[in-house]
Image: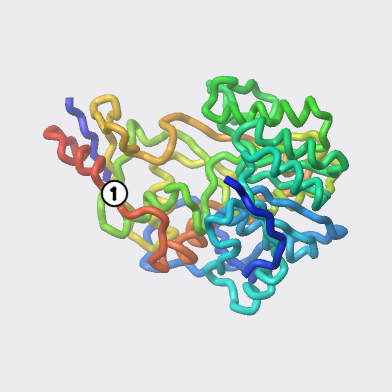
Amino acid sequence: MARLVLHHKQPSFSLLPASSLSDFHATRFTSTSFQYKRKVWQPKGGLRVTALSSKKILIMGGTRFIGLFLSRLLVKEGHEVTLFTRGKAPITQQLPGETDTDYADFSSKILHLKGDRKDYDFVKTSLSARGFDVVYDINGREAEEVEPILDALPKLEQYIYCSSAGVYLKSDLLPHFETDAVDPKSRHKGKLETESLLESRDVNYTSIRPVYIYGPLNYNPVEEWFFHRLKAGRPIPIPNSGIQITQLGHVKDLATAFIKVLGNEKASKQVFNISGDKYVTFAGLAKACAKAAGFPEPEIIHYNPKEFDFGKKKAFPFRDQHFFASVDKAKSVLGWKPEFDLVGGLADSYNLDFGRGTFRKEADFFTDDMILGKSLVLT
């Protein structure tokens, strides 16, 4: 049932072992309906990787979310993997569902380079001294952060960059393709400028543009936002009609795409959108989260955001618009395809994270209560 609310420095350098991904599984669902069943879906299937000659790989970042899964795949393929971080977070952490043996094996093989990527002199000296074949830049936001890396590694074989589908210019014609116009004023303009820098420097680069990313250990409140409300038995407040169409891609599918471009001539100087195979409405996403986690289909509350002053609070985790991109290029050029459908991927996230009692942010229903407290409610 839906209701409508109307009312109206000095960084240090270290290279030492830090203290393989076991099979992380997920169910595949083919049904398009969201019938509630009192059951938490058990996951099946796992990540797949392909063989490649061993490379010395540097990951800029790598201690959370995308980097956690990517680094395991790279180590599993036999690459020497070094994480460049400030050292403020543990260099490795055991993933949910990962065996002690697999974690110990992974941890023993990871190397760490401690420093601040914004200390450009340090970046140049430390990277040139070490030498790397490939750089995966997971946390780069500005082009100026990338220049010293390129200067330090003139013989670099490949620069693989995590950009964002947020660089596209808002359009009435969807889905977004890699050739679509981009927005130089986007909040992701730094990523767009980085892509331009890589092109101008004639680097063998590949840029990956994810849409919304979800999965276990997600530090952005995407699926977690819905799970908090479902667990509390609360209605789900969704702006406007709820038929806005969006797109989510599982972090493990993203990690696999990053592996697919490594050493791949077809990926040279190319951009690829990466996300899920299908699109979903906001209301459909709420129902998918409920089905994946074994909760009843939720009550959905529709509201007009313009009628509320939420201050600095964010009332909904997605941009209030249609936003989705084609992944056809990655499928045809790279031979990549997402292994997770939406409900299966959400089940994987829930069972390996929120369902175990772990989450990144505490539940905050302040804006929900503002919406529900409006005096005029239609049912």
Furthest-bottom residue in this view: 101
Residue 293 vertical position relative to residue 229 in the rendered view, above or below: below
Spot occupied by residue 147 in the image (x, y as percentages of width and height)? 72, 33
Question: Tag 1: Cα neighbours inside 10 Å, few (<14), some, or many (≥20)?
Answer: few
Q: Can residue 258 be seen from the camera position used here?
A: yes
Q: Label 1 amino acid?
A: Asp
Spot occupied by residue 152 in the image (x, y as percentages of width and height)? 79, 40
Decide which of 145, 167 is in the foreground and name it: 145
Decide which of 245, 12 is in the foreground and name it: 12
Residue under label 1: 364
| Residue 177 figure quarter | top right
Spot occupied by residue 84 in the image (x, y as percentages of width and height)? 66, 52
Q: Can residue 272 be seen from the camera position used here?
A: no
Residue at horizontal 57%, vertical 60%?
28
Residue at horizontal 63%, vertical 37%?
163
Decide which of 104, 171 is in the foreground and name it: 104
Furthest-left residue in this view: 375
> Quarter of the image containing the N terminus?
top left
Residue 227 vertical position relative to residue 7 in the rendered view, above or below: below
Is 169 positioned to the left or the right of 20 in the image? left
Residue at horizontal 42%, vertical 68%?
356
Residue at horizontal 68%, vertical 69%?
106
Residue 315 vertical position relative to residue 32 in the rendered view, above or below: above
Decide which of 31, 112 is in the foreground and name it: 112
| Residue 244 figure quarter | top left
> Quarter of the image containing the C terminus?
top left
Is 373 positioned to the left or the right of 70 in the image? left
Is 292 positioned to the left or the right of 17 in the image? left
Spot occupied by residue 90 in the image (x, y as percentages of width and height)? 55, 62
Colour mode?
Answer: rainbow
SS type, badge 1: loop
